[in-house]
Amino acid sequence: MHDQDFKHTPITTNRLLGALPARELERLFPDLEEVELKFGTNIYDLNGTIGHVYFPNSGIISLLAAVEESSTLEVGLVGLEGMAGLPLFLGVKESRVQAIVQGKGTAMRMKAADFEKECRNGGGLPRLLLRFCHSMTVQISQSAVCFRFHVIEMRLARWLLMTSDRMETNEFQMTQDFLSNMLGVRREAVNHAAISLQRKGIIAYSRSNIIIIDHPGLEACACKCYTILRDEEARPTNN
């Protein structure tokens, strides 16, 4: 029987799950439940146990590194292209970052024990996760370079583009406090950079909402880190 012969293959917009053979996804689906991702919700606490992994269908999860509760910096973004809970795949049961929903949506959630069992089965999922692990390594490394060498307006433009790509929308909810935590700068710096982009006619910005008006213009304002990361994520999974 061929994969296309399955008439009841579960539907998910998560690209990792969607890249699995239909037969394998069919077998996996009873262990998955669809859950809501609510804006501002903690998925993992810093150094907390990973009880579930999340495959977003929509929305976005931010990975925050911290030296203390009030000092955080975003080091990674996960949307429908990937999965939250990657350390579990690497044999680590605790999260070394805080994972928080920064764009509402839904996700397919799987218990840690079921996920670990599936990874030991040697099917298509471990191969896809190895590729995603490399993509996240590149993203985290490039984010460190970006933070060190690029000005806040360029970093904000990159971040908005990455968020838009993962949420597949040009409008999303975002507060100054949240942006401040994401980018590791004071609220005044975020506000100044956002107003600068707004004056150029690239975004519409309020205290809790952002709309990308001119996508090519935003790309022109962003640092090259955006295209590096976008091209990396677009590589075929079998490379």
Image: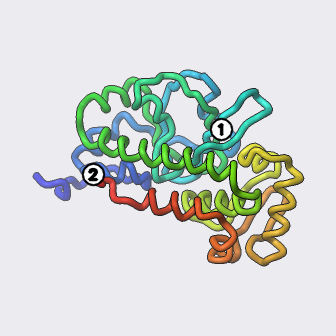
Which circle's residue, 2 or 1, is located before the other in the chain?
2
- The residue lying at 56 percent from left, 44 percent from top is 140
Which percent across, then down, holds residue 51? 50, 25
**Marking on residue 8:** 2
Of tags 2 and 1, the one toward the viewer is 1
**Which residue is pictured at 61% across the width and 40% down the height?**
63
Q: Dot 2, how many residues are within 10 Å of its Cα: few (below 14), some (14-19), or many (20+)?
A: few
Quarter holding residue 233: bottom left
Question: Residue beneath label 1, please?
Answer: 64
Kindly identify the residue that appears in the image at 60 percent across and 23 percent down: 47
Which label belongs to residue 75? none
Is 18 positioned to the left or the right of 101 in the image?
A: left
How many other residues sit within 10 Å of disc 1, few (<14), some (14-19) or many (≥20)? many
Q: Nearer the viewer, residue 225 or 116?
A: 225
Disc 2 residue type (three-letter): His
| 115 shown above or below 223 | above
Where residue 153 sits, quadrant-wise, is: bottom right
Circle count: 2
SS at mark 1? strand
Q: Residue furthest front?
A: 149
Depth check: give the residue in front, 117 or 215: 215
Which quadrant of the figure contains the C terminus?
bottom left
Callout 1 amino acid? Leu
Answer with left or right where residue 177 lies relative to residue 27. right
Task: Return the x and y of residue 224 as percentages of the image width and height.
Answer: 59, 64
Determine the CA span between mark 2 and mark 1: 38 Å
Residue 27: image location, x then y, percent: 26, 39
